[in-house]
């Protein structure tokens, strides 16, 4: 398997599609929000980038669940392996492409998958605890490499529920082995990435991102559910609720996306420290130069 990763706005989707066109490959998306239907501008799907010289590159795990649902890494691992096996049966190459570090790492390092039911009794016992107390409990149950579970109370409760279940059902799971291959990362100078993020945000606002969030609200997706998805959906919902002015929304959202990109790079660097080799491709090179670099590295890897 070939993996292409990088922070938001670095150009990884276009690069993956161009590579797929050369290798007769299919792409599996590793993006935790692009799974949702109707969440297009806010998640940066850019589906037009999957068309290369008139050829539509097959992609997977995009638009697979309804907005409002809380899709998670356990479901992603299951869905990834279903897509991966299907592609392999067609004798095609697989390119995993995305920026959600937890999803990428779950595939590259292997993952224990268990369908964990809700535990009403456990939740009742946790109901009186503060968020701070829940965080302490969760960190006592597992090592936490990021704080995504800390941002919403429901995420905290679900994470505790999952870890508690694992401890009482140690054998009730499917163990997926690591998927081997070669990993490429797109590296851009920080100021260039910041400029791209800011420009892309303005473009998406101009093209209908606010209207997209309003349409989701009109369909019955609750404000709380949209805020759960973070970034664009959180801040635009706050705008539509009247909690933020337009200028405050843009400024706070822009800052939040920059911080998110920094966290992505921190995650990838941590993966490297834990032994995952990432071949970094210079992001300022032309698309043709980047493809050439990747093809040379692939040839050396195969040899």
Image (cartoon, helix red, strand yellow):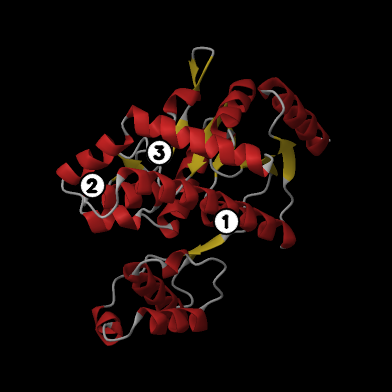
| Numbered label attached to residue 240 | 2
Mark 1, other Cα within 10 Å: few <14 / some 14–19 / many ≥20: some
| Numbered label attached to residue 263 | 1
Mark 3, other Cα within 10 Å: few <14 / some 14–19 / many ≥20: some
Q: Is residue 287 left or right of residue 78?
A: right
Q: In this view, does 72 lie to the left or right of 281?
A: left
How far apart, in angstroms, are the residues tagged by discs 2 and 3? 26 Å
The secondary structure type at the circle numbered 3 is: loop
- Say if 140 sits above or below 16 in the image: below
- Residue 302, quarter of picture: top right
The secondary structure type at the circle numbered 2 is: helix
Mark 2, other Cα within 10 Å: few <14 / some 14–19 / many ≥20: some
- Say if 138 sits above or below 64 in the image: below
| Residue 213 pos. (x, y %) | 27, 42
| Residue 106 pos. (x, y %) | 55, 57
Q: Which residue is drawn at 76% across and 29% down?
A: 293
How far apart, in angstroms, are the residues tagged by discs 3 and 1? 23 Å
Q: Which of marks 3 and 1 is nearer the N terminus?
A: 3
Q: Which of 303 and 266 is in front in this view?
A: 266
- Residue 35, quarter of picture: top left
**Circles 2 and 3: CB atoms closer than 8 Å:** no
Q: In this view, does 189 lie to the left or right of 299?
A: left
The secondary structure type at the circle numbered 1 is: helix
| Numbered label attached to residue 174 | none
Q: Nearer the viewer, mark 3 or mark 1?
A: 1
| Residue 177 pos. (x, y %) | 60, 57
Quadrant showing the N terminus: top right
Q: Which residue is drawn at 69% across and 56% down?
A: 269
How far apart, in angstroms, are the residues tagged by discs 2 and 1? 27 Å
Q: Nearer the viewer, residue 39 or 189?
A: 189
Q: Which of marks 2 and 1 is nearer the N terminus?
A: 2
Residue bearing mark 3: 62
């Amino acid at each position: 398997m070939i993996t292409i990763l990088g922070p938001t706005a670095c150009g990884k989707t276009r690069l993956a599609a161009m590579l797929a066109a050369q290798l007769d490959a299919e792409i599996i998306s590793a993006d935790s929000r692009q799974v949702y239907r109707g969440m297009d501008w806010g998640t940066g799907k850019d589906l037009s980038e999957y068309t290369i010289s008139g050829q539509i590159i097959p992609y997977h795990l995009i638009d697979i669940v309804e907005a409002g649902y809380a899709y998670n890494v356990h479901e992603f691992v299951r869905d990834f392996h279903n897509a991966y096996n299907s592609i392999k049966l067609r004798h095609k190459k697989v390119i995993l492409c995305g920026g959600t570090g937890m999803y990428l790492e779950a595939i590259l390092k292997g993952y224990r998958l268990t369908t964990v039911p809700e535990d009403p009794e456990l939740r009742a016992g946790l109901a009186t605890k503060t968020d701070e107390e829940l965080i302490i409990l969760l960190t006592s149950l597992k090592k936490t490499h990021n704080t995504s579970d800390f941002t919403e109370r429901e995420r905290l409760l679900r994470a505790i529920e999952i870890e508690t279940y694992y401890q009482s059902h140690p054998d009730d799971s499917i163990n997926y082995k690591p998927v081997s291959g070669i990993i490429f990362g797109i590296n851009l100078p920080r100021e260039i990435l910041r400029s791209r993020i800011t420009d892309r945000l303005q473009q998406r606002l101009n093209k209908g991102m606010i209207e997209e969030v309003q349409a989701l609200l009109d369909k019955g997706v609750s404000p709380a559910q949209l805020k759960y998805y973070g970034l664009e959906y959180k801040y635009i919902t706050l705008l539509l609720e009247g909690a933020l002015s337009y200028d405050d929304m843009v400024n706070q959202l822009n800052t939040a996306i920059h911080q998110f990109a920094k966290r992505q790079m921190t995650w990838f660097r941590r993966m490297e420290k834990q032994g995952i080799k990432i071949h970094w491709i210079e992001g300022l090179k032309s698309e043709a130069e980047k493809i050439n670099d990747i093809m040379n590295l692939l040839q050396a890897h195969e040899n």
